[in-house]
Image (cartoon, rainbow, N blue to C red):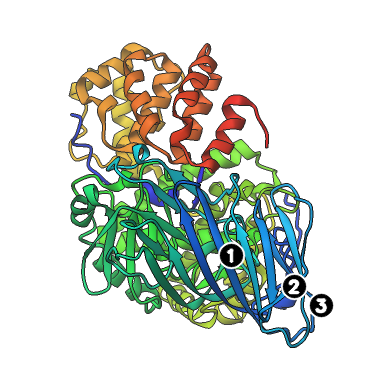
């Protein structure tokens, strides 16, 4: 998700641009296995672990009118630790009552803590089997986005979807809301008749007459993978284990776009072993979805901005699919270990892309990713502890760790290991790792220790060459960071220089440039770029009207920087229809920096705020209105 939320990195759009012509060390160098009991999840108030909560049964009613979920969450408990109370995470929930083994029980809710919400305390004893919480969601439920018909693609019926990662599940389910606690779940969900409900579970693919849907997830998952969507949806199969859900008006286009998803699952399996979740379906959401995609098990949620009409953008799915191994199958124990989810997934995603599109293509992804990493390190400061792979987010919003560090520094570290160990050896190791820790949870130290035993062993040269402490517990970009090389974009750099030196834009040698090359071309533009030069490029290539959202975002940033007003109406359309924070945050930030831009930012934000997800609103309130929550 974000600026980078998970899937965003996945989203380098693949279309050909045809539409327009001394380091501080925190850890001992001798690594030791951290016993799972020793984890401290700073973002979980619950006292439960995977041994204590086994199963969740949700029985909820979704009121689209009231914008509220109400019902019960029944937890199956195994109190082997003889705890005197079960503590669950909640955020802005109203607790109506609690029963323990069917009998009404006492409970109390602590005061709210910033970011974390309120701990719900329920007394239990050693024999307690079931704890049921009857509750309602609040107006400030951070996981829920309620869309009016007007905010959907078809504009006929309301829509609801959830985004539970990182710690938002607690705003719609009272639960142990940490990535280190896994449970299975079943659910009965009642929705207005005529609408379809979907979850990160076994789904029905037809609208039923009763409005009641039942779900089952038999693999244990952490709370951040709990997901629900309710809307006027339809389904089309792709092959016998993949398919797509979307609003009716978009379903045929979506089905066409995702033709190769089945093949992609096969490519991923060839790399790191069997896909263990049964079906893999994709749900295309309305435009306000704040991130590129979310890896909800069995049902990836994704932005509609990848429906391009030519199947060229579907590779965003590679990232979410890769999470079926890194993240969903083997999960980071705490948000401080987030790079285990995202660095591995970025690495895996690029390997899938290499398999499907070739090495040169993947290398361009690596190089653009390296550039993103450099920018992020510059932005955070090269000595900042926030540039370590192992983060320390105690007392902070876990979303503070949502930037390019876990994604890009993480995957570059893995690439370094691959290059030094050899690809075959590294691939075998990764397959073993996914197998060994399947359906469980891993801290950074557990991974490093496992790698030390299984991959490195007596290979002291390998241990020395991958400088683990420097990468994991040190800031910035280590000097041994592998780089695909600028020469990949050499031709693009030459054309940019010639253009800046006065060559007419039409004479540029841009034939068959991919979106990566165009993106690199625009990213390299100097501060001195003039509006007249923007106009020349636009006259030649009509970039203002590109359908590629990555390129559009970069172009509009340049338009703000250079006062290229002709692009503003298209930028406003973009801001009114795009919900991804990846695009919204840099664009609004750029406006705020421009002379006179603050007024424009405020005007546009006020106009389109309601189109954005509450999480996007939170960060934009800060950027545009200087309001801190
Ligand atoms: Zn991700």
The answer to whether 475 is drawn above or below residue 54 in the figure is above
Query: Is 363 situated above or below 107?
Result: above
Mark whose residue sits in front, 2 or 3: 2
The residues tagged by marks 1 and 2 sit, at their Cα atoms, a distance apart of: 58 Å
> Circle 2: is it few (<14), some (14-19), or many (20+) Cα within 10 Å?
some
How many marks the image carries: the answer is 3
State if disc 2 and disc 1 touch (CB < 8 Å). Answer: no
- The answer to whether residue 227 is above or below residue 626 is below
Instruction: Answer yes or no: is residue 618 visible.
Output: yes
Q: Secondary structure at mark 3?
A: loop
Ligand 1 within 8 A of label 1's CB?
no
Which residue reaches farthest right? 84
Residue at numbered disc 2? 105
**Could you tell me residue 84's position as x and y percent?**
81, 77
Disc 1 secondary structure class: helix
Residue that mark 3 sits on: 84
Viewer-side residue, 526 vs 282: 282
Mark 1, mark 2: which one is toward the viewer? 2
Label 1 and label 3: CA atoms lie apart by: 50 Å
**What is the number of the mark on residue 465?**
1
Badge 2 element: strand
In percent of width and height, residue 539 lies at 22, 18
* Residue 33 seen in render: no
Disc 2 and disc 3 in contact, CB within 8 angstroms? no
């Amino acid at each position: 998700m974000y600026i980078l939320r998970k899937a965003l990195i996945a989203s380098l759009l693949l279309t050909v641009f045809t539409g327009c012509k001394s380091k501080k060390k925190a850890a001992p160098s001798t690594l030791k296995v951290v016993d799972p009991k020793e984890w401290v999840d700073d973002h979980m108030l619950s006292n439960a672990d995977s041994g204590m909560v086994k199963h969740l049964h949700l029985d909820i009613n979704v009121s689209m009118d009231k914008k509220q979920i109400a019902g019960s969450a029944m937890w199956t408990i195994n109190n082997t630790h003889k705890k005197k109370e079960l503590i669950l995470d909640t955020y802005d929930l109203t607790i109506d009552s609690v029963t323990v083994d069917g009998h009404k029980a006492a409970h109390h809710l602590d005061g709210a803590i910033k970011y974390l919400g309120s701990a719900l305390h329920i007394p239990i004893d050693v024999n307690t089997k079931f704890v049921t919480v009857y509750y309602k969601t609040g107006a400030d439920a951070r996981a829920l986005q309620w869309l009016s018909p007007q905010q959907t693609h078809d504009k006929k019926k309301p829509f609801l979807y959830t985004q539970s990662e990182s710690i938002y599940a607690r705003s719609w389910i009272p639960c142990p809301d940490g990535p280190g606690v896994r449970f299975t779940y079943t659910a009965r969900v009642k929705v207005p008749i005529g609408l379809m409900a979907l979850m990160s579970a076994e789904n029905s693919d037809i609208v039923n007459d009763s409005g009641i849907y039942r779900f089952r997830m038999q693999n244990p998952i952490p709370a951040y993978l709990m997901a629900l969507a309710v809307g006027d949806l339809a389904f089309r199969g792709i092959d016998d284990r993949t398919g797509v859900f979307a609003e009716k008006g978009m379903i045929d286009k979506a089905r066409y776009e995702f033709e190769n998803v089945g093949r992609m699952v096969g490519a991923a399996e060839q790399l790191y072993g069997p896909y263990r979740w049964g079906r893999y379906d994709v749900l295309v959401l309305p435009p306000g979805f704040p991130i590129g995609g979310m890896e909800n098990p069995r049902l990836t949620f994704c932005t509609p901005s990848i429906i391009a009409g030519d199947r060229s953008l579907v590779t965003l799915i590679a990232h979410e699919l890769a999470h079926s191994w890194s993240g969903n199958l083997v999960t980071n124990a705490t948000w401080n270990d987030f790079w285990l989810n995202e660095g591995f997934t970025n690495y895996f995603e690029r390997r899938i892309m290499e398999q499907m599109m070739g090495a040169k293509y993947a290398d361009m992804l690596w190089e653009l990713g390296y550039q993103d990493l450099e920018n992020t390190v510059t932005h955070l400061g090269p000595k900042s502890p926030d540039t370590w792979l192992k983060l320390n987010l105690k007392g902070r919003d876990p979303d503070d760790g949502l930037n390019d560090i876990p994604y890009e520094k993480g995957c570059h570290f893995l690439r370094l290991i691959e290059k030094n160990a050899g690809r075959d050896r590294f691939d075998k190791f990764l397959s073993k790792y996914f197998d060994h820790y399947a359906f469980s949870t891993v801290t950074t130290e557990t991974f490093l220790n496992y790698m030390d035993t299984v991959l490195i062993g007596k290979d002291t040269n390998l241990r020395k060459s991958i400088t683990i402490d420097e990468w994991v517990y040190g800031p910035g970009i280590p000097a041994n960071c592998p780089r695909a090389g600028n020469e990949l974009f050499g031709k693009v750099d030459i054309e940019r220089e010639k253009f800046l030196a006065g060559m007419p834009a039409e004479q540029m040698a841009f034939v068959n440039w991919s979106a990566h090359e165009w993106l690199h071309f625009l990213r390299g533009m100097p501060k001195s770029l003039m509006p007249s030069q923007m106009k020349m490029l636009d006259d030649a290539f009509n970039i203002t009207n590109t359908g590629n959202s990555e390129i559009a975002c970069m172009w509009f940033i340049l338009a703000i920087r250079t006062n290229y007003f002709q692009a503003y109406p298209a930028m406003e359309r973009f801001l009114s229809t795009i919900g991804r924070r990846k695009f919204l945050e840099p664009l609004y930030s750029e406006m705020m920096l421009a002379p006179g831009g603050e007024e424009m930012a405020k005007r546009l934000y006020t106009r389109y705020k309601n189109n954005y997800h509450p999480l996007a609103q939170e960060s934009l309130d800060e950027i545009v209105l200087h309001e801190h929550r």
